[in-house]
Image (spheres, grey):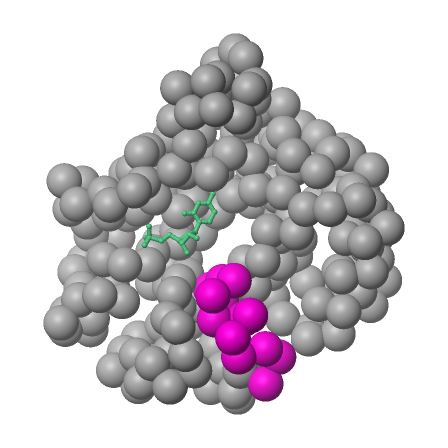
Amino acid sequence: MTNTSLSQVIVALDFPSEKEALHFLDKVEGKLTYVKVGMQLYYSQGPELIEKIKAKDLKIFLDLKLHDIPATVAKASQVLAKLKIDMVNVHAAGGFEMMKKANQAYKEIHPEGKMIAVTQLTSTSQEVLNQEIGISGKLSDNVLHYAKMAKEAGLDGVVCSAWEAEFIKEKMGETFLCVTPGIRLNLENAHDQKRVKTPAQAIKAGADFLVMGREITKASNPKEIVNSIEKDLI
Ligand code: C5P
């Protein structure tokens, strides 16, 4: 994607409560276009918060990473489709049938919505993949395998590390979305993320959307950080 801008930055609202999330949104008012609601916030506040965020004219990526038997994930996807938000996700590790059924169920109700698949979490290293998760081989091969499966199942793209975005774009085509967490202005401050890039590096590598959390949400002046990200993306 060219003409990069803040509209490609999805800010992860990883807050424990609606009050804190809305307070943060007030602090950065007018700067953001896309936010991510994850498990912590959704499980504590539910769909009412989604409506409040929608009322602020913000796009929403609901990051619940569904992973269960195909029928259960398809039914959950129908429920999420009724929220009429912009993007939801499932774990590719749930397999082809799970992704296909989830995507069909979701798009029947909300055809404009995007469904993407998590490949490997950006906190997963090569060592964790092999020794803890029990998948042998190279991490990048596994990410590519999951991305191919997601595409065949009809999904719109994947969540992946910016380190994988380049070869995913190359193999899957330009229109297959790469949504990349593990983004840091300051690469020294990676927290638990193992595979990080700066906003500009991630876009250069082919990312369509950058998911950014703690570096913005934990900042004493989040607007200042958002401005720095905007500058980095020019
Ligand atoms: O704070 P940080 O910028 O690391 O936040 C990244 C966000 O992206 C978190 O909400 C995390 O749950 C999410 N995420 C991730 N890796 C994935 C999928 C989602 O870090 N593969």
Q: Look at the image and tell me whether residue 170 can be seen.
A: no
- Taking 140 as reference, is 208 above or below it? below
- Which residue is depicted at the point 41% across and 38% down? 122
- In the rendered image, residue 45 lying in the magenta stretch gets the answer yes
Residue 134 image point, x, y percent: 55, 19
In front here: 92 or 11? 92
- Taking 186 as reference, is 142 above or below it? above
- Which residue is depicted at the point 71% across and 67% down? 80
Image: magenta residue range: 36-48
Residue 18 image point, x, y percent: 43, 82
Residue 164 image point, x, y percent: 44, 29
The quadrant in which the C terminus is found is bottom left
- Taking 160 as reference, is 130 above or below it? above
In front here: 85 or 112? 85
- In the rendered image, residue 52 lying in the magenta stretch gets the answer no
Q: Is residue 116 left or right of residue 100?
A: left
In front here: 180 or 41? 41
